[in-house]
Structure formats: structure tokens, C-alpha cells
Image (spheres, rainbow, N blue to C red):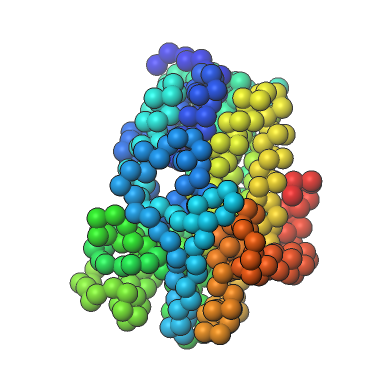
């Protein structure tokens, strides 16, 4: 394979990389979109594009990429005591009042096709290493031979990003790791559910379970476990999925079914809360999961991936030489305040099953849950900025203030603030 020249190499064709490539190509840049897989390909995910992701599709005229998606509104949180809290979905000033459910196999392929239609060139191969030195990037070398030469590289290659590792932008000792396991089942579920589960009484699972309706009468069901720095703990989600499905049957959310492996099982790593990762330096910018842009409290990643891909592309188009600083500033303004609090809360709860269980039981107590539902929905889903006026915004704003005060002493919060001065 001969060398290829481009203005920007985007490594990874998921939502972050595809949106970045599309925005760059529309802006007149020569873009090489590198991915190790041929599309369509599957991905471990809850398959839900949150309201801010839906807004990105609207802004970029990409609604066709979500053709056939199932709109989702309110969400139900099922607590450890069996109590349910319905979190309302309301439109904000700059996002709609609904999410979309669509299998990643279809969604990612549609986004890649849109990027290529805009002028990006697809290159199938694994980025083996970065080219360049202290003076900056010169592109990537592919493991099958050949190089893609460019003065800017956008790493969109997931939580275990080879680009982030090669550029020295990740400290594995500090990362908040998580592992998610997903399966598809045939079932009729009206509303998406987040499940706060206790495998044994008052000892919470270190994360949450989900049951999301999807198009065609299927549901996406799975477990997401926080592991902090111990990636070996991810196997726990795999072992516990059958017991979790039985819990859903006991709660009447799934019909009795056969024991054994469920179809479509797939797992993947998550990197959360921007912790332990420098999102940009020199000519390398990280987006989506590669940057640690997964909500530490409820696991959303697709909307964050799309918004970060757009921000990174716009930063490069505004001037490659200053792109890293501009991107860090814009990303910090968009996410740092929330992720500092959420990451500190995540770190405090994972590994403390009794405390996590108590928090889940308190929040889903009927009187408490009903009083907090509107604000809980806004804050938990990172929708406070841009929310319309009203009681829900006041509750979410108070949660942000109290969370900021409570998390100030957290080592996770302090390290994040020190590594990103002025970002919030």
C-alpha cells in the first residue's frame, strides 16, 4: 500500500469519528477516515442517541442517518426496593425532548456513508503507530503497510484508544474504567428503564442495568459495571447477566424465557468522566470514548461522541496550529463542570455496595423520587445547560451546586481540575 496524503487523519469510524470526518470534509479539508473494520459492523452499546445527539443530527442535516429509529421520551428508574420513578423528557432551548433508539450496526454505517458522501476517503486498516516526534504529528502508519500522512490526527478509536496511548495522552492509573455487556431480546417494553440492582440485599451492583425498547419489537438489555482502575473486574458483568435477566422477569419487565446464552451478546470497555486523559496536544485530538467522554452516572456516550467530533473538526478547520488549545477550551466549557462532579460521585460509589444501595433506595423512595424526578432527569442526563425555566431546572441547578461543594475534596475532582485549568 502506497503512502496517502491528507489534511487530517481520523482514526475510528464510530459516531465521533464519522461526524468529525463529515464536518472536516464539508469545510474543505482532505480527510482520511481510517477504521480496522468494514461497515456495517456491530458495537456493544445501549443504542440510544440522547437529545443532544439528536440535535447534532438536525444541525448537520443528518436526520436520514436515523431513519427507522424509535423515538424515546420519558425514562423509568427501577429502584432496589421495586419502586419506580418516571423521569420526564422535556425539550430544552437547544435540544429536543426525546432520544432515538437505533442499532449501532445501522447508525454507524449511515454516518460513515454520509462522511464519505461529503468527501472523506475511507481507509480500511488498523493504525499501528503515530508518525512524527516532538515537533508534531505526521500521520499514522497502518499495520498492513503504507502510511497516511497528515499534520493532524483525530483519535476516535474508542476507550482503549491506540492513538491516545501512542501520543502519551492517557494515564491508565487514573482512568475511571467501566465494562458494558449488551444483548438483544424479543420483548414488548414501552419505556426505557434504568435498573438499580442489588444482587444481594442492600449490596448494590457497581453500576446499573438497562432495558431499552428498540425498533422492530426488540429490546436492548445489559449491564454496565464501574471497575475504577481494575479492568479485571469487568468479567463480573458477564457472569451476572443471567441473574440480572431473572431479576427483570421477577419485576415483570421480561416474560419467562429459556436459560442460557442470549443472542447478540457483546461487551466493550468504557472510559468515563474525562479522568486520566488529556484530550488534545500538538496535532492530536481525542474524541468520544477515546477522550473519556462517557457520562459517569448513566453511561451515555453517543451524544458526547458526536458533539466532541464536531468540536474537534471545527477546531482544526479554524487553524491546525492552535486546534489543540481551542478544542480543550471548548470541550472544557461544554463538559468539565458536570464531569468533575459526576466522576467524583462515581469514584465514591463504586466499591461501596452498601452506600450505593442506600443511595439507590433513597432516590427511588416514592415521595423523594416524585419530588426530584424533573430535576433528576435534567442533571443525570447532563441537560441542565440549555434547559427551560421551571422547577425542574431549579432542582437540577441545586444538585449541581451541592454536587460541586460535596465533590471539591475528592482526589478525582482535584486531579481533573488541576489537569484542565480554566476549562470549566
Residue furthest to the left = 258
- Front-most of residues 269 and 195: 195
Residue furthest to the front = 389
- Front-most of residues 375 and 34: 375
Query: In this picture, is 121 found above or below 328?
Result: above
In x, y percent, where is residue 52? 53, 49
In x, y percent, where is residue 391? 64, 70
The residue shown at (74%, 49%) is 424
Quadrant placement of the N terminus: top left
In x, y percent, where is residue 243? 35, 75
In x, y percent, where is residue 384? 63, 58
- To which quarter of the image does residue 341 belong? bottom right
- Front-most of residues 97 and 143: 97
The residue shown at (45%, 79%) is 84
Query: In this picture, is 114 found above or below 373?
Result: above
Q: Report if residue 51 is visible in the image.
A: yes
Q: Report if residue 108 is visible in the image.
A: no
Residue 393 left/right relative to 232: right
The residue shown at (70%, 55%) is 337
Query: In this picture, is 382 found above or below 56?
Result: below
Query: In this picture, is 159 found above or below 226?
Result: above
- Front-most of residues 421 and 103: 103
Amino acid at each position: 500500500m502506497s503512502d496517502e496524503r491528507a489534511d487530517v487523519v481520523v482514526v475510528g469510524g464510530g459516531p465521533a469519528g464519522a461526524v468529525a470526518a463529515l464536518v472536516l470534509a464539508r469545510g474543505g479539508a482532505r480527510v482520511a477516515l481510517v477504521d480496522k473494520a468494514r461497515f456495517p459492523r456491530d458495537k456493544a452499546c445501549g443504542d440510544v442517541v440522547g437529545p443532544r445527539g439528536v440535535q447534532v443530527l438536525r444541525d448537520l442535516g443528518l436526520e436520514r442517518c436515523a431513519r427507522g429509529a424509535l423515538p424515546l421520551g420519558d425514562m423509568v428508574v427501577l429502584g432496589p426496593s421495586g419502586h419506580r420513578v418516571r423521569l420526564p423528557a422535556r425539550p430544552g432551548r437547544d435540544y429536543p425532548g426525546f432520544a432515538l433508539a437505533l442499532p449501532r450496526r445501522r447508525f454507524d454505517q449511515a454516518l460513515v456513508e454520509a462522511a464519505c458522501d461529503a468527501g472523506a476517503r475511507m481507509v480500511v486498516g488498523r493504525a499501528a503507530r503515530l508518525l512524527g516526534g516532538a515537533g508534531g504529528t505526521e500521520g499514522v502508519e497502518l499495520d498492513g503497510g503504507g502510511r497516511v500522512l497528515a499534520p493532524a490526527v483525530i483519535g476516535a478509536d474508542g476507550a482503549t484508544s491506540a492513538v491516545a496511548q501512542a501520543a502519551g495522552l492517557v494515564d491508565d492509573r487514573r482512568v475511571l474504567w467501566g465494562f458494558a455487556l449488551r444483548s438483544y431480546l424479543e420483548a414488548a417494553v414501552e419505556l426505557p428503564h434504568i435498573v438499580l440492582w442489588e444482587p444481594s440485599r442492600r449490596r448494590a451492583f457497581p453500576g446499573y442495568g438497562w432495558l431499552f425498547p428498540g425498533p422492530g419489537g426488540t429490546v436492548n438489555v445489559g449491564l454496565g459495571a464501574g471497575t475504577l482502575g481494575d479492568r479485571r473486574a469487568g468479567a463480573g458483568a458477564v457472569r451476572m447477566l443471567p441473574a440480572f435477566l431473572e431479576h427483570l422477569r421477577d419485576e415483570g419487565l421480561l416474560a419467562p424465557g429459556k436459560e442460557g446464552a442470549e443472542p447478540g451478546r457483546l461487551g466493550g470497555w468504557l472510559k468515563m468522566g474525562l479522568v486520566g486523559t488529556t484530550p488534545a496536544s500538538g496535532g492530536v485530538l481525542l474524541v468520544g470514548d477515546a477522550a473519556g467522554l462517557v457520562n459517569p452516572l448513566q453511561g451515555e456516550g453517543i451524544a458526547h461522541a458526536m458533539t466532541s467530533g464536531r468540536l474537534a473538526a471545527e477546531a482544526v478547520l479554524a487553524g491546525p496550529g492552535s486546534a489543540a488549545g481551542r478544542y480543550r477550551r471548548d470541550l472544557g466549557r461544554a463538559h468539565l463542570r458536570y464531569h468533575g462532579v459526576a466522576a467524583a460521585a462515581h469514584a465514591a460509589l463504586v466499591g461501596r455496595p452498601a452506600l450505593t444501595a442506600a443511595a439507590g433506595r433513597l432516590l427511588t423512595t416514592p415521595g423523594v423520587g416524585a419530588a426530584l424526578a424533573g430535576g433528576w432527569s435534567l442533571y443525570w442526563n447532563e441537560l441542565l445547560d440549555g434547559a427551560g425555566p421551571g422547577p425542574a431546572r431549579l432542582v437540577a441547578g441545586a444538585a449541581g451546586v451541592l454536587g460541586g461543594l460535596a465533590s471539591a475534596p475528592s482526589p478525582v475532582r482535584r486531579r481533573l481540575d488541576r489537569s484542565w485549568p480554566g476549562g470549566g
